[in-house]
Image (tube, helix red, strand yellow):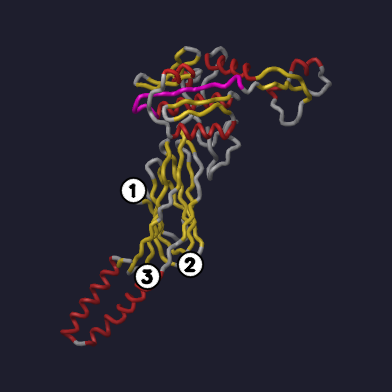
Amino acid sequence: MRPTIRGWTAIAVVALSFAMVWEFGPRALNAVVTPLLVVLVVGALTTARATRPEVRRAPVSPGFVDDRRTVEIALETASAVSATVRDAVDEGATVTDIESVSGAETEIDGRGAPTATTTLEADDRFEYAVRLERRGEHRLGPLTVIVTDVFGLFHRRFDYDETTSLVVYPRVHDLRSDPGSDLRAFVERERGDREEFDHLREYQRGDSLRDVHWKSAAKRPDADLVVTEYAADEEAGSVTVSAECPPGRDDDLATAVASVVTHLLEADVSVGVTVPNGEYPPGTGSDHHHTLLSAFAVLEAGDLEDEQRRAADIVVRAGDEGTTVVVDGRSIPFDRLIGDRRGNGRSRRAGSTSRATRNQPDGDESGVVS
């Protein structure tokens, strides 16, 4: 517990008043110092008896660069107390708005940290919104609560070690897959290898229209639709994507490999990944997609072993001359894969979803995108 500037001023006035007693007698002491002493004592006791607020941080869902998320912190106090609440924010996110308890004075300080000065009563909530700026695993917190007395003479600081992890995925671009392109041919071949025809059955609600056997439907216009049932070969059709780059090119590499992997998973291809700081076995579905995106969020620069390159079906490389994707032995500039017919690239925006991620629980905003 320490005096505030106002508290030090009050203490200085009391000390000066005691000095004046020698000149003008005790009446000056009674008129000025006694009320001020009472205020100082009450303020000191109130601040000293203040209990440490309980803090609970809610998890923040991962997101892509330029997404927005809300950070929620629950504060519980035994009694009403004046306090200033401040949370530290890593450079990977920028505070855009503060939504604290009603009547609070809020600001974003010079370090970009959200701050609210208010009266905490029982259960309160400190909330602020952030924009995700840079891929990686970032930290929100630690939190600081500074309690003061009603007169603002003394303050007591409570520090909390708990932090919230914020994972920011790299940007993901929609890739071209025109008929006759290397990427399109590769995907169709892998999907064909993975599934073999088994039999036809009646159409059921929820079946994909892609599996409807239209030739049979055309021959029997009055009959129910039938769909093709495939016998999946779990061992076939698994694609391994390897990625490597020199130092300083890891962001470019993360964007490229995340885009390629997302494109393959959306095409129902089982994908495994080898990167300099980890290997991930083939898999499909939303959980696998988010596991890979989390890995790309912390992807590091480095070189792969020759054996890892030879074992990969697709190799993604980033270097000083650009980023390339090697498919079937042919090197394709990544910029060409993300360009449309007029040469313009398209990057997925916040709010867009894919089949690989649309079942993932969302955050406070429009959801995790890909």
Q: How many marks?
A: 3
Mark seen at residue 111:
1
Q: CA gap, disc 3 to disc 2?
A: 14 Å
Mark 3: which amino acid?
A: Ala
Above or below, comparing residue 249 to residue 330 in the picture: below
What element does badge 1 sit on?
loop
Rendered view: 325 above or below 26: above
Q: Nearer the viewer, mark 2 or mark 1?
A: 2
The quarter of the rendered structure image containing the N terminus is bottom left
Which percent across, then down, holds residue 133?
41, 38
Relative to 155, is 216 on the left or the right?
right
- For residue 28, above or below residue 47: below
Q: Which residues are magenta?
A: 235-250
The residue indicated by pointer 2 is 78
- Name the N-terminal-most of marks 3 and 1: 3
Q: Are marks 2 and 1 in contact (CB under 8 Å)?
A: no
Reply yes or no: does residue 248 show up in magenta.
yes
- The type of residue carrying mark 2 is Ala
Nearest to the observer: residue 320 or residue 311: 311
Q: Residues within 10 Å of mark 3 (few under 14, many from 20)?
A: some
Is residue 100 shown above or below 186? below
Residue 167, given in percent of the width and then of the height, sits at 46, 39
Residue 352 x %, y %: 55, 34
- Secondary element at image label 2: loop
Disc 3 target residue: 48
Q: Earlier in the sequence, mark 2 or mark 1?
A: 2
Q: Nearer the viewer, residue 13 or 139?
A: 139
Residue at (45% x, 25% y) in the render: 256
| Residue 337, x across and y down, in percent | 48, 19
Q: Marks 3 and 1, Cα distance to the nearest angstrom?
A: 29 Å
What's the residue at 34%, 27% (across, down)?
247
Residue name at image x 40 percent, y 43 percent? 94
